């Protein structure tokens, strides 16, 4: 059985049972928040409250919310293999233009799998299982791997700061997450 078939329904029921307690009470005193109805408490606004978008790796050891102290409703979390900015660009543009984010935090991490291979290796693995007619699509697939963690963070921040589709006034920073300790170390 899969996780979705076996465990997800019960996990979601538990999540729903506590959903109303995720009050968007920041502008209210704690006492006023308690007085709000359950419907009012569960209605977070669509735009992220802190106007922050985080680009991070999809690695299961990285919890970008916990590591940054941001909570549900505070920020957008855009995740992909390696936390690469180029792959996150479409989501970042939507986040800025339609939902008002004005800060981007790039988070890459130690012991990242993207440090361990080249695109050609990935292409070779895929070619073993697909019809040769699909080889052109495979060749176009860029893994966006990197050989130097700090440089990948610096490169992604520079990419975002220079990109014409990212608002010029955007604050962009880059951090290295240490999977061994949970530390976020500022790189740029």
Image (tube, rainbow, N blue to C red):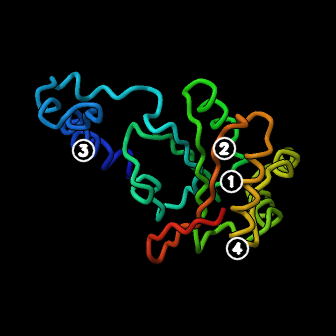
Q: Mark 3 or mark 1: name the one nearer the start of the chain.
A: 3
Is residue 103 placed above or below 40 in the rendered structure? below
Nearer the camera: disc 3 or disc 2: 2
Residue plotted at (46% across, 34% down): 48
Provide the residue designation for mark 3.
10
Q: Where in the figure is residue 76, as x and y percent of width and height?
A: 51, 40
Provide the residue designation for mark 1.
84
Q: Residue 13 vs residue 104: left or right?
A: left
Q: Where in the figure is residue 132, as x and y percent of width and height?
A: 86, 50
Identify the secondary structure beneath mark 3.
helix
Q: Are marks 3 and 1 in contact (CB under 8 Å)?
A: no
Nearer the camera: disc 4 or disc 2: 2
Provide the residue designation for mark 4.
116
Estimate how packed mark 2 is, as few (under 14), some (14 to 19) or many (20 or more) residues with alpha carbons within 10 Å: some
Estimate how packed mark 1 is, as few (under 14), some (14 to 19) or many (20 or more) residues with alpha carbons within 10 Å: many
Q: Residue 42 vs residue 33: left or right?
A: right
Q: Mark 4 or mark 1: name the one nearer the start of the chain.
A: 1
């Amino acid at each position: 059985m899969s996780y979705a078939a076996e465990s997800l329904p019960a996990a979601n029921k538990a999540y729903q049972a506590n959903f109303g307690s995720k009050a968007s009470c920041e502008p209210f005193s704690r006492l006023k928040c308690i007085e709000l109805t359950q419907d009012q408490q569960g209605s977070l606004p669509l735009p992220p409250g802190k106007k922050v978008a985080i680009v991070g790796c999809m690695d299961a050891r990285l919890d970008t919310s916990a590591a940054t102290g941001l909570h549900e409703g505070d920020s957008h979390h855009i995740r992909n293999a390696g936390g690469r900015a180029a792959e996150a660009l479409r989501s970042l543009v939507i986040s800025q233009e339609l939902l008002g984010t004005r800060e981007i935090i790039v988070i890459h991490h130690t012991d990242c799998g993207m440090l361990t291979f080249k695109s050609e290796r990935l292409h070779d693995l895929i070619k073993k299982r697909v019809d040769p007619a699909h080889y052109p699509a495979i060749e176009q697939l860029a893994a966006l791997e990197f050989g130097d963690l700090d440089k990948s963070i610096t490169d992604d921040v520079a990419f975002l700061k220079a990109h014409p589709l990212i608002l010029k006034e955007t604050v962009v920073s880059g951090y290295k997450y240490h999977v061994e300790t949970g530390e976020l170390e500022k790189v740029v």
